[in-house]
Image (spheres, rainbow, N blue to C red):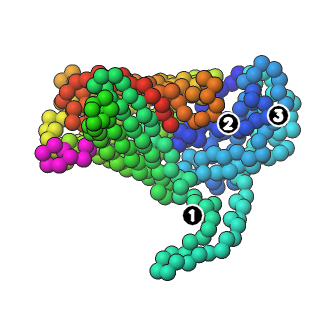
Amino acid sequence: MRSFSVSCPLAAALFVAASPVSAQLHSLVEPPASAAAALDRGVDVFLVNEGRSAQPVAAPETIDTVAADGTALTLSLVRSTADTAPVPPGGFVKLRYRLAPRRPAPVREAVTLAGAETIVDDARGPSSGFFDRFRPYEPTYAVAGAGNAGAKLQFSFAARPIAGGIGAHLNVAYTQTIFWSILQRSGPIRTNTYSPEVFFDLPISRSSTAAFGYRHDSNGGGPRDSVDLNRIFVRANARFDLGDGWQLDIAPQSWVFVGNHGIATDLERFWGYGSVNASIGQRDGLKLALMARGNPGTGMGAGELLVSYPLRRFGAGDVGLYLFGQAFTGYGEALPDYNRQSTNVRLGISFTR
């Protein structure tokens, strides 16, 4: 069986499961460069038979995907390309889709508030396209461990503020990580890490991207206890299709510090100037992700392992959650601990991974 490597700056657009008539058939979209490309040249969609018997072609009439420039698209089937023989086991057929014509939003009665903008009672008008540009970024999860590990909660998102042109490569992101001492008597929040970020991402090839930008990490402290990281970074990401729904991602990153670090004047000794993120996972299956950073000159650093598995694989239904494990060892899991070593293991659930 041939395999196809498909890339896009948005990881969520790489694989599109199409609601086929048979669960053995899955559609794999090769994202177009832009909406104009999808309209002019069409989009190749591969219908893959992962079962053990031949299946009739049951192509979805429409498919949602995201172009390489970040534009959300709805594609419609070119029906003549679906008139083909059944798909053999382990085989595929190539279908053709084009950009679906946009349906006009229904006209609703406008409501005008005194001294305010006009509000249209409709959530699917053109203005809703802004929210389509939001996406998950780092994993969003809630985990807890024994002893001093406590609970760790994180939520993260990114957005493309500009829909088209070169501005579509601009990203803003925000991540917040909460360390909660749930086993202490009053259950205090021990510390937070606030991480706003702005960066540009650029496709290098069909399976790799590069990004550069600025990230600020802070515990939100005052003059006496603030720990701050201000970094200008550059990173690359390469994706490898391993077949059978498995893929490998490797993302090295390097940075320089700017500004001051608050009370953490020697932070570089523990964080160093670079990191490597790597993950291997199967679509709708197991995923392992590893982060490693440090300073080779001092021998100090840290590593974190994330393991996730869909709860629906345990018969929990399609709840959209994952069983999630997180393990950290090294310096600086929480910013105030930048110069203290710890090892923590936690278990919980994640909403994204």
**Residue 221 forms part of the magenta stretch:** yes
Tell me which numbered mark, 3 or 1, is placed earlier along the sequence.
3
The residue located at (70%, 60%) in the rendering is 102
Mark 1 highlights which residue?
127
Q: Amino acid at mark 3?
A: Val
The answer to which quarter of the image holds residue 252 is: top left
Look at the image and give the residue range highlighted in magenta.
218-226
The answer to which of 183 and 195 lies nearer the viewer is: 183
Q: Amino acid at mark 1?
A: Ser
As measured in the structure, the alpha-carbon distance from the residue carrying label 2 to the one carrying label 3 is: 15 Å
The answer to which of 89 and 154 lies nearer the viewer is: 154
- Residue 279's x, y, as percent? 47, 26
Is residue 97 visible to us here? yes
Mark 3 highlights which residue?
57
The residue located at (70%, 45%) in the rendering is 63
**Residue 54 forms part of the magenta stretch:** no
The answer to which of 149 and 339 lies nearer the viewer is: 149
Is residue 212 visible to us here? no
The residue located at (63%, 65%) in the rendering is 122
Q: Amino acid at mark 2?
A: Ala
Q: Which mark is residue 220?
A: none
Contact? badges 2 and 3 (CB < 8 Å): no
Contact? badges 3 and 1 (CB < 8 Å): no
The image shows residue 230, relative to residue 334, as above or below, that is below
- Residue 86's x, y, as percent? 85, 29
The image shows residue 201, relative to residue 127, as above or below, that is above
Taking the image as shown, residue 300 lies to the left or right of residue 198, namely: left
